Structures are given as C-alpha cells and as structure tokens.
Amino acid sequence: MKKFIAAILALSMSATLVCGCNFGGGTENGEGDGGNEIIQPEPKPEPKPEDKLTAHLKANLSADGYVRDNIGDFSVYENTEAYRKVTTAEELLEAIVDAKCHYTNVWDEETSTYTQVPADGYTEDNFKGTVRVIEIANDLNLGYEVLSDAAKASGVVEDFSRKTMSKHFTDYNSEMVKENGISQIKVENTSDLLIYSKNGVKLTHCGFKLTSDNNVVFRNLVMDEIWQWEDSPSSSTSAIGDYDFHGWAYFKIAFCGYIWIDHCTFGKSYDGQIDISNPEYTANAGVAFRAPYGADGTSSVHISWCNFNAGSDDEDGYLYKMMQEIEEDYQNGNYTALYYKALRDGGITPEEILYGIAIPQKKGFLCGDSGDEYAYNLKLQVSFANCTFKNLEDRIPKLRGGNAYMYNCVVDSSQYFAYRTQLRSKNAAGLVSAVKSNWKCGLVSQGIVCGNGGSVKAENCIFRGIENLLKNNDSNSADLVNGGYQIVNCSYQKYANDTPYIGSSSDKYPNFSNSSSSILTPEFFSWHTEDGEQPFTPSVTKLKDLEEYLANVDYGAGAKSEISLSLLKSKY
C-alpha cells in the first residue's frame, strides 16, 4: 500500500512540474489549506468576430478581386512605433510624410530593367518610411483655407481649388468653398501603409492623390463636401453645366501597384468619385522613374464594401444649405446664378433642381488616361465588389482600356431617373442653352461606359433607373475604339414599373440596353492577362439576398461607427 501511495505522489509531483498545476490547492509558496480542491481548466478565449463568419463572407471581406493575396497584414504593427494615432490635420499630414519612402529607380538601357536604391542623403537603414498604420481618431476638416501654416508646409498638401478657382473667381462660388477651401493630400512614393479609423470618422473638403504607391489601403472613412453648384452671374462664361472647371475627386490614382479602398462612404464630388490612370510605370519616356517601391509591375485597384451616395437632402447638410441660399437669392432678385435663374424662370421647381441636378452624382469612375495612345491602358485592372451606388448619372465605371470587374454590387439611380424625366419634359436643357449656347443640362443616364480596347465584366449585380446600361463614347483612337463586356446573372430594371430582367449577356435574347451595340459587344470582350484567362473567381451572393447582405449593420457596405472586424487584417 505504501508503495502505491508513493507512486501516486511521484506522479502528482511530475504533473505539477510539467504543467505548472498545483493539485494540492496551496499557493506557489507551498501554503494553503491542504485540501483536495479541483482546479478548473483555463477558459478558452472568446472567438474573434471574424472567426464566426462563413467562408463566403470571409472571402468577400478580405482583400479580394485584383488585389487578392497582395495586401499585407497590418496587425503586426499594432503597439509598435510604426502605428500612429492622429487627432489633428497636422498630425495626419506629418504621419503621411513619415510613411514616405526615399528611393530612386535606376534604369538600365541595355537590359530594360531598373533597380531601386536609396535616394541621395539616405541609406539602406533609413530610406524606408517609419509609419505603417495611421489611425484617424476623430472627424477632420481638411479644407485648405482652414489648415495651419505648419500643415501647409508639410509638403504633402496642395490647394485643390486655387489652380482652377483663380480662373473662375467671378463665377458662382459657395460660402462653403470660400470659407474652407479644398485640399488635395498627396500620398506619394509610399509602400505598405494603412490609413483607417475605428469609428467611421468624417474627412471633409479634401481628396487624396496617390502616386507611385504600393500596398496602400484606406478603410472605414467617410469623405464628403468637395462639390459646389456650378453657375455664373455672367452670360459670357463658357461651359456652365459641364462640371469640368475643377478636377475635384476623392481619389486620383496613378503609377501605383496594389491599392485597396474598403468600407468607405462617399458623398457628392464636383468631378468624379475616383479616377484611376497610368497603370504602366514605364509609360513615360521608356523609364521607370514612377515605379512604386517593392511593386511587382502589376497595377491593381480593388474597391470593396463602399457606399457611393451622391448628395444628401439633409436640411442641416452643406448641399441643402447651399441650394437654399441660391433659392433665397433668386427670390430676393439677386441674380448671381443665371443658370439657376433660367431654370426657375422656365418653371422648374426647387425640388426638381435639388433632386434632379444638385443631389445626383454627375460622374462616377474614370479608369484610364486620355490621349491618342491607349495601349498602356490595357494593363489597367480595377475591381468593384459589394458596393452600393446611389443616384449616379454616368461612368459606373468609364473604362478606357484594361479590365474592370464588378460583382455583388447594387446600382440604384431610380430617384434621379424619375426627376430626370420631369426635367426633360420641361426642356431644362433648352432653358439654360438659351442663356448661352454651350451651357448644358445634360441629364445623362448611363451605366457601364467602355471603349478603347477595354472590357468590363459585371456579375451578380442589380441595376435600376439607367436608360443606357451599356455605352461606348470614346473615339480618340480609331484602331482601339471597340470595347467588350460580359454580364453574368444580373438584374436590370429601367423604369420603376418594369419587371426586372434577370439574365446574362450570353442569353439568346438579352435585355440590357446598349446605345453603342456596334462597337461595344460581348464579342469584343477579352481578359488582358498573360494567358488570356479570368484572373480570379469571386464568391457571389444570391441576388435575392444581395441588398440585405450589403445593408448588414455589422459588416455591410459603408463606413461604420462600430465594425465587427479587425481592420488591421487583410484576410479573414
């Protein structure tokens, strides 16, 4: 019996040494009640929210599409000096400066290759940026007129309104723009950077210019207030109504590698929402001076889980107040806005102007540079996934070469389409052109605009309130004017009373309106890849569930005050 007890004690001591358990119930010092207390095993940690997701959701919430498996994991920088939390415009701009890489691309004519070396004054030890994550902790007004001198001296912000406004200072300028200005924030020569917020902060009066960047990500941000009504007190002013005076957009992306814009909400912009151009680093004079550091030669943009909302009719919002001020001036006989006056004098109501012209977004997404030579645009790659587009008039997207892939998206312009019908019935275009022949009220209604060798695929998307779902209006280059498209399992409803047509472009009698059926056809579709094959296969949602899926409060489209994801991760 004594041998048995000794063996049990020896086994107990051995287990204590191995696992650190104290089966005797005492303390580490050997003190205790000497009882036979049973020690409960350590509780398992609660699973993270993303661990509870289905495989389908994990695939869609990860960096997918054209950036799949090419966006880094930023969680490794948490609680390090590379993580910067900012609360002011000065801190944000300083962090962007510190994220920049200082390098030079050295071109070898004989081998037609380049190497990347530290710029003058830098070494291998200090040429890379020191910031990898910028967390914006609160709303920021980034308008140029309200920035401090220190912020303006940062070298990464430009007056986005000065260059164009100086030519139109006698035209209508809103109090909002005069008081705040518009900034363009330059993120240049930057690799491996995440700019995000945990609570969906709002950035106003600014856009970002991305040049020679790679693995740069923007997540969970609201961007708004870079639009104003276009008008003039003089009938001699040209081209009112075109909205071409100012090139304000939320993102302008050029010469970049992998860029991901995710879970953001966008208000109305003056020009486009996002412009993407110059995908080939060697497009300029045969040298690669624009190549991003560490990029692999691929230029790809993925836009996911974003809400593109056009303007808002919130009575406390800037757009409503702007239009209210113009109407009050009109009522008081202060005719500083002749375009507006022509509409009102012709019987157009303030409501029709608000919902038919002021709120809708005139231009969406321009993908591909302009000019006579489009060949390098064929390397353009952009994907739109799990996004909503509300009251856009045109360019969803406009593609000049390359490929665009849309999946799990909802494009609903039905409100704009209804007011457009009313404005057209009252000859709004004729009313403004009577002031001057080149004043326009275009009231276009177009969706996918594709040409110059480009091809768009739309899969599992819903389109509403669009007259010409398919359009080609690029004619600059005669030998590359054709465009191609594929539509797979999409819903299309032109008028509110129409029964939606659900089908594909491969159907025997597809019912997708195409105003350019001779130069934009499925036969001209091609994948501009090395093997000519589709580069990825998305995980699609059932059409009947799509709108509910995108409206999910935890992970759905748009910026969130609370989001059940670790936004530092790129793969779930």
Image (tube, rainbow, N blue to C red):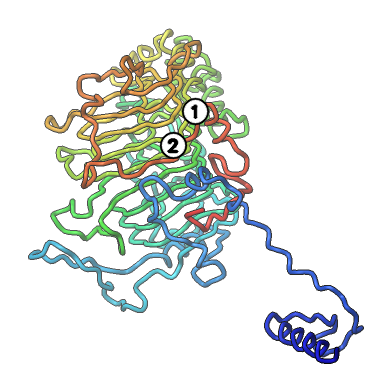
Instruction: Give the SS element for disc 1.
Output: helix
Most foreground residue, 512 or 15? 15
The x and y percentages for residue 479 are: 12, 32
Q: In the depicted view, which residue is nearer to us: 73 or 364?
A: 73
Which element is circle 2 on?
loop
Left or right: residue 265 versus residue 298 is right
Residue at 37% x, 26% y is 447
Q: Residue furthest left?
A: 110
Q: Is residue 231 left or right of residue 547?
A: left
User: What label sits on residue 543 in the rendered view?
Assistant: 1
Relative to 400, does residue 288 appear above or below in the rendering? below
From the image, tell me which residue sits under label 2: 269
Q: Amino acid at mark 2?
A: Ser
Q: Is residue 110 above or below residue 268?
A: below
Q: Earlier in the sequence, mark 1 or mark 2?
A: 2
Q: Nearer the viewer, residue 294 or 504?
A: 504
Name the residue nearer the viewer: 202 or 319: 202
Residue at image x 75%, y 80%?
A: 21
Q: Is residue 90 above or below residue 183?
A: below
Residue 508 in which image quadrant? top left
Instruction: Please tell me how crowded label 1 is: few (under 14), some (14-19), or many (20+) other residues with Cα within 10 Å.
Output: some
Residue type, label 1: Leu
Q: Please name the residue shown 44% across and 47% down the image.
A: 261
Q: Quadrant of the N terminus?
A: bottom right
Residue that sits furthest to the front in the current view: 1
Q: Dividing the picture into quarters, in which one does residue 17 lie?
A: bottom right
